[in-house]
Image (tube, rainbow, N blue to C red):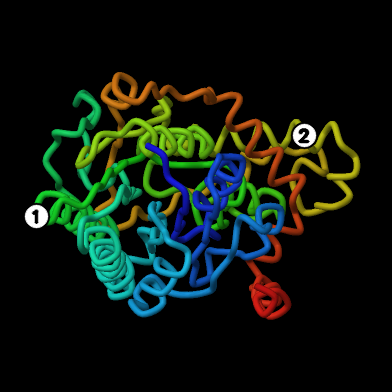
Amino acid sequence: MKLDSMLITGGAGFIGVNFARIIQSREISRVVILDALTYAASGSSLESVLCDKVQFVHGDIRDSTLVARLMDEHEVDCIVHFAAESHVDRSITGPDEFISTNVDGTHCLLKAAKQRWLAGSGSPHRFHHVSTDEVYGTLKADDPPFSEVNQYQPNSPYSASKAASDHLVRAYHHTYGLDTTTSNCSNNYGPFQFPEKLIPLMIVNILHGRKLPIYGDGMQIRDWLYVDDHCRAIESCLDRGKPGEVYNVGGDNERPNIEIVRKICDLIDTRVAEDEDLAVAFPDCLASVGESSLGLLEHVSDRPGHDRRYAIDYRKAANELGYAPLESFESGFAKTVAWYLDNEQWWRSVMDGSYKDWLDANYSKR
């Protein structure tokens, strides 16, 4: 599908930033990144992306006036919708914001898209909705992986809010004829992920010699997907996805959480042992004094309603979109750990909130 003007929501967040970096080289006239810059997003992540073709707008997807204006001013014919509250623990303690952003925000975008694209004779367009495998619930050890025909059984306020937004996207396609696609992805990892999620949190804790909290026995299994593989799958959805269809996107890497944490410990211990500068920069890291970071492991009480296993069957995406993950478990995790070790300034800035300084210094220029 030939698309000329794209609106990326949540484009300063983890997956959105990586998608913007990939889409920058695409033959497209303009890209508008809309992000509210909440705690997990950073405008500084976009510094290598922003240019005459790629613009940033600070705003909320629930602001219907703003969304409609952006779509009209930039003649948007494609929305790639990443913007969402996504941390399960936060949804348990404060579900209201998840319902508001993930459900109401998605509906606001759908209404604007319907008005812009379906009024009058209509025009070629695509609304791509980025969702999660968590909408399907949990799997037993011997269950087959989730496919697109699995029943929705969300178990947390987060996954319930995403399930609701998925249903709204489906409804706008079947009721109004909006050209939509949806992708349900497994656990993403890679550069620019805020250090509240498992992998970057463990990296930062190891470097500071802090305990590594493991929920329960640590045997919760996830299918780990390197973020660039996910972004390529979304591109394929835009190019070859059939209107109204859902595509599951996985990494073909089912691993228990405890194995992930042990792997991170090993990778950091090896890198610090080989690099004296890292040992000096992170004196509290156990590897800096020749000890194993595995000594930081600490099992804690499991969280309520913790899904035991996720796994993705991506055969439909493979057959219809030509998708296959390029990164293996070993290559993807090595790249990710290396990126965080080499980009200390980034993760420190997002954790201490200094990303707001970027907004103050740069937003007036855009």
Which residue corresponds to the image point at 38% horizontal and 70% vertical from the top-left? 61
Say few, some or many: other residues with alpha carbon within 10 Å of mark 1 (under 14 / 14 to 19 / 20 or more). few
| Badge 1 element | helix
Name the quarter where the C terminus is drawn: bottom right
The residue tagged 2 is 271
Q: CA distance from mark 2 to mark 1?
A: 55 Å
- Residue in front for this viewpoint, 117 or 325: 117
Name the quarter where the N terminus is drawn: top left
- Indicate the amino acid at tag 2: Arg
Say few, some or many: other residues with alpha carbon within 10 Å of mark 2 (under 14 / 14 to 19 / 20 or more). some
Among the 4 quarters of the image, the one containing residue 324: top left
Residue 183: % across, % down: 31, 41
Which residue corresponds to the image point at 58% horizontal and 24% vertical from the top-left? 330
Residue 206: % across, % down: 66, 48
The residue tagged 1 is 175
- Residue in front for this viewpoint, 258 or 30: 30
Which residue corresponds to the image point at 51% horizontal and 49% vertical from the top-left? 298
Position of 120 with respect to 126 (left or right) is: left
- Indicate the amino acid at tag 1: Thr
Q: Residue furthest front?
A: 121
Residue 181, above or below 322: below
- Inspect this view and state whether residue 219 appears: no
- Of badges 2 and 1, nearer the viewer stands 1
